[in-house]
């Protein structure tokens, strides 16, 4: 589930390795991955990669001729650089950019669902005006907005754990890092987005910076090319329900939703209250 720090380290590693490298050929084996047809994928052939960057949770491969390959890894995608080309039987391949010396930049997606997507755009305006980019809120890192209370206020009664994952409100945070950030800020995931005291908003902002900075420092040490299938997320709370809270020792609790699990510390975040586990309560009905 790549979020801001995972996408950022991917952009850094690929950017370092690929700047100045020409594209020999391009192919999109994923049936639904390529979402644009003009300019065609073949426009990339013969062009040189200029760099790789991140916007929110998106990756942009900047290519000569003012071409930009915008991609979203969704929940199970990876953009990886391999020293050898993929076998034709690799069913995870969604986009292949073939490079000199048999190297290959490959968008892969694990699992059965095809959600990861790619757009080939001409001109920086086309990137900025793309529906996926134009609707993004301000970046959560490296410098989230100073006044987070004002940013979150229009979200009304929606709880923090939902508002902070809404890319239109603030870009980059997903299910993993929202748990870490709220735990660090000692805020309840169910606190209303429009109900932050200035001091709480400042704590939330500081937590965002510290947690995302920390993740990137960790990845700078731990992540190397080709970019691992499973990134080593340095999580303290998310996926740690049942373990002691690293700060106070209370057993971390979780709320199970349809497709994900939200973890928190009852002592630090919810005034000792253990929130209803929705999955359990449904089973017990
Ligand atoms: Zn705790």
Image (cartoon, grey):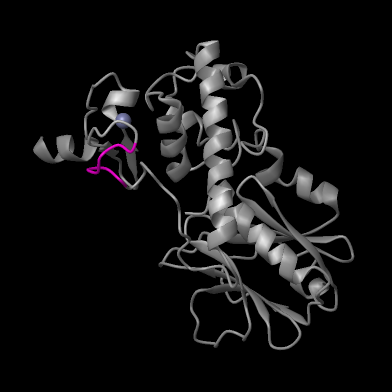
Q: Position of residue 124 (x, y in %)?
A: 84, 50
Q: Position of residue 239 (x, y in %)?
A: 33, 48
> Is 241 within the magenta?
yes
> Is 126 within the magenta?
no
Q: Position of residue 57 (x, y in %)?
A: 60, 49
* Relative to 20, 149 lies left or right: left
Residue at x 66% of width, y 79% of height: 104
Determine if residue 240 is in view: yes
The answer to whether 15 is drawn above or below residue 238 in the figure is: below
Residue at x 77% of width, y 50% of height: 127
Q: How many marks?
A: 0
Q: Quadrant of ligand 1?
A: top left
Residue at x 54% of width, y 70% of height: 108
Of 33 and 247, the residue lying toward us? 247
**Residue 101 sits in which quadrant?**
bottom right
Q: Quadrant of the C terminus?
A: top left
* Relative to 224, 233 lies left or right: left
The answer to whether 204 is drawn above or below residue 59 in the figure is: above
Q: Mostly what secondary structure, the magenta segment?
A: loop
Determine if residue 72 is in view: no
The answer to whether 181 is drawn above or below residue 4 in the figure is: above
Most extreme residue toward the right is 65
The answer to whether 240 is drawn above or below residue 264 in the figure is: below
Residue at x 87% of width, y 66% of height: 64
Magenta residues? 240-246
Q: Position of residue 84 (x, y in %)?
A: 62, 86
Of 145 and 25, the residue lying toward us? 145
């Amino acid at each position: 589930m790549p979020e801001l720090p995972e996408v950022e380290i991917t952009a850094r590693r690929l950017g370092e390795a690929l700047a100045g490298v020409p594209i020999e050929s391009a192919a999109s084996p994923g049936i639904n991955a390529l979402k644009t047809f003009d300019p065609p994928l073949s426009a990339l052939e013969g062009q040189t990669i200029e760099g790789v960057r991140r916007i929110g949770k998106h990756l942009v491969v900047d290519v000569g001729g003012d071409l930009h390959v915008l991609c979203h890894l969704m929940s199970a995608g990876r953009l990886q650089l391999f020293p050898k080309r993929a076998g034709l039987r690799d069913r995870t391949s969604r986009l292949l950019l073939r490079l000199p010396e048999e190297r290959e930049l490959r968008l892969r997606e694990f699992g059965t669902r095809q959600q990861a997507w790619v757009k080939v755009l001409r001109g920086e305006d086309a990137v900025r005006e793309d529906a996926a980019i134009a609707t993004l809120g301000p970046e959560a890192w490296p410098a989230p907005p100073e006044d987070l209370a004002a940013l979150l206020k229009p979200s009304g009664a929606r709880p923090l754990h939902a508002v902070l994952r809404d890319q239109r409100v603030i870009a980059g945070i997903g299910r993993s890092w929202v748990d870490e950030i709220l735990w660090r800020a000692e805020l309840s995931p169910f606190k209303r987005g429009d109900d932050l005291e200035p001091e709480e908003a400042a704590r939330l902002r500081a937590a965002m910076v510290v947690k995302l900075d920390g993740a990137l420092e960790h990845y700078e040490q731990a992540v190397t090319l080709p970019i691992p299938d499973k990134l080593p997320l340095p999580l303290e709370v998310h996926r740690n329900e049942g373990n002691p809270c690293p700060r106070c020792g209370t057993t971390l609790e979780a709320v199970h939703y349809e497709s994900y699990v939200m973890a928190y510390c009852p002592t630090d975040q919810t005034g000792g209250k253990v929130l209803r586990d929705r999955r359990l309560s449904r089973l017990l009905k």
